[in-house]
């Protein structure tokens, strides 16, 4: 988890405990892009409340707050477990038999890593080696 994501989760924990921070990333050095989820869904009102609560972040960066959408980011072991059986794209920091990107069905998820059945075969990837991952359609 990035430092900015940890800061955001800490700021939201007290006032919005049911908001899940799916991904927080600094884009272009000047903007924080934040994807959130909530058991009741993500509304414009919720995005506005979150934005207001994140004033300390907004003093340093521009802020974009949105719902995860169809290609929701997968950043935590619980996300991968929740979406077993779904199609995902996992991009890695290092090579796995010459590949850095895998698209296929999520077939396993432990505390250490994820297993994906991709076109090139079944591959296990440790979470520390995942650069970015998200669900994909179709």
Image (cartoon, rainbow, N blue to C red):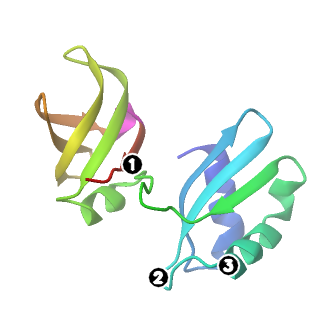
Residue furthest front as drawn: 138
Mark number displayed over residue 106: none
Of mark 2 and mark 1, the one earlier in the sequence is 2
Mark number displayed over residue 134: 1
> Mark 2 — residue?
39
> Mark 3 — residue?
46
Is 54 positioned to the left or the right of 128 in the image?
A: right
Residue in the picture at 47% in, 82% down: 39
- Residue 103 within the segment the image draws in magenta: no
Is 100 positioned to the left or the right of 48 in the image?
A: left
Badge 1 marks a residue whose secondary structure is: strand
Q: Is residue 103 above or below residue 100?
A: below
Question: Crowding near pointer 2: few (<14 within 10 Å), some, many (20+)?
Answer: few
x and y, in percent, of residue 67 in the image: 56, 66
Q: Is residue 59 above or below residue 25?
A: below
Q: What residue span does the magenta drawing correspond to? A: 127-131
């Amino acid at each position: 988890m990035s430092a900015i994501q940890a800061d955001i989760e800490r700021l939201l924990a007290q006032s919005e405990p049911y908001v899940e921070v799916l991904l927080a990333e600094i884009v272009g050095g000047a903007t924080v892009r934040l994807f959130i989820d909530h058991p009741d869904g993500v509304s414009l009102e919720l995005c506005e409340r979150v934005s207001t609560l994140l004033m300390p972040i907004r003093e340093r960066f521009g802020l974009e707050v949105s719902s995860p959408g169809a290609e929701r980011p997968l950043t935590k072991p619980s996300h991968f477990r929740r979406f077993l059986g779904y199609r995902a794209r996992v991009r890695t920091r290092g090579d796995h038999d010459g590949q850095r990107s895998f698209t296929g069905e999520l077939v396993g998820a432990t505390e250490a890593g994820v297993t994906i059945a991709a076109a090139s075969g079944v591959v296990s990837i440790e979470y520390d080696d995942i650069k970015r991952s998200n669900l994909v359609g179709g």
